[in-house]
Image: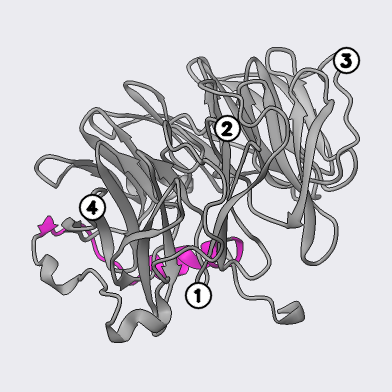
Amino acid sequence: MENGRKSTRRQWIATVAGVAGVMTGCVGSDRQVESTTVVDDDSSAETTTPSDQPTTAATNSVPATGSWPMDGVNPANSGSTANWNGPADGITKGWDHSFRGNIYEPIVADGVVFLGVEASEGRATPTALDARTGEKLWSVEQPKPYGSPTYHDGMFYVGSYGGLMAIEADTGEVSWKFDTTAVRMVPHDGVMYVSGSEFGAIDLESQEFRWTAGYETTGEIGTFGGLLLASDDTLLVPGDNAIGAFDAATGEAQWIRDHGDNVSPEMAVAGDVAYLLTTSDAGTSAIEAYRWGADETLWTYEDAQLSSTMSVANGRVYASRAESPGLLALDAETGEQLPGFSTDVGPISGRPSVAGDTVYGWAPASDINGTLSAIDGTTGEIRWTYTGESGFPPQILEDTLYYMEDWNADRIVALTSP
């Protein structure tokens, strides 16, 4: 790897499909939780787990209300929240916390920042930090995780080589484990929908599969496609060169649509429309709006510089671009560029994060540093910028941003209003 850079989530997530072959199907819940232990500060594992104290102690008031509970924020994978706008007039560092191993992108819920920390010998330590101060609350040793964790109803859910693990958010106690490879997890109404070695629905009360669907059901999509909840009774699964709709109660395929181009597993839904990022064999990228209940393509927008998953908010589609301007804004109904939107932000790395009417994104300026911009979602005006080590797209709670630095992938930072 160039410049000795450590591997990050972008690199290891691509290897997940190869790992799934060694995982077998569900064997039900596994109550032998004594094999997964909370790591004490003076244990031998401390060399690979975080210290109790943040690297930089909290110097500002960092609020910790609300939640950003999963990758994509919600079961529709919109990448946006309407509950707040984020910092209005600039930011300053609240705290940061460094680790002795790579970390995986965090989520934030109920005053806790939750993330995985890579340890030695194929192990990892899911870790909880106080969202206000950055202090460590607890950590748990387990096989390496993959994919982002998910929070639901007082529990953190982590997929790992050892299966799906449910961890009490308050204490770090492992409540139960389940033998399935969960790359993507979507909770809803007492069920955890998972894709990975199996595509299925786990009853969170009984810790048993309500249903599973294998390749005979999912076809070309396979079981490692993306996963999102389009409605209370329909799951959408994009992957490879197809997209499918499945009954959320039974797992039965409602329809599977072959697509001529490669479909990114990171799709977003707003109402009855799904927004897909596709790439042709010739390398042409496009955003496609697809009415999933009617098998109807509404519009397609081609842009060779599309570089990442899009976010959907306020009747708009925001997507990162690999050259300036680094942010594309489309009318979600028509697919046309948003009238009056103009921005001079540089190429944005990763998915734009949207809070209220503000779009946040990192534009790398060098191998290490970059500029985080808060962009008016209507006009494209840059409201404020912050320069520091480049990071992954931030998680946003009230007027605080949490992000994982991208260079060595070993530090999380909280930025808040001055």
Q: Amino acid at mark 1?
A: Gly
Label 2: state its secondary structure.
Answer: loop
Label 1 or label 3, whichever lies nearer to me, is: 1
Measured Cα–Cα span from mark 3 to mark 4: 46 Å
Label 4: state its secondary structure.
Answer: strand
- Which residue is found at the position 83% from the left and 40% from the top? 326
In the figure, is residue 217 to the left or right of 294? left
Residue 203 pos. (x, y %): 17, 39
Give whichever of discs 2 and 3 has the lower sequence position: 3
Q: Quadrant of the N terminus?
A: bottom right
- Which residue is found at the position 72% from the left and 30% from the top? 89
Residue 21: image tag: none
Residue under pointer 3: 340
Give whichever of discs 4 and 1 has the lower sequence position: 1
Measured Cα–Cα span from mark 2 to mark 3: 27 Å
Compared with residue 309, is residue 398 higher up or lower down, i.e. above or below?
above
Residue 101: image tag: 1
Measured Cα–Cα span from mark 1 to mark 3: 44 Å
Q: Amino acid at mark 3?
A: Gly
Residue 166: image tag: 4
The magenta stretch spans which residues? 10-30
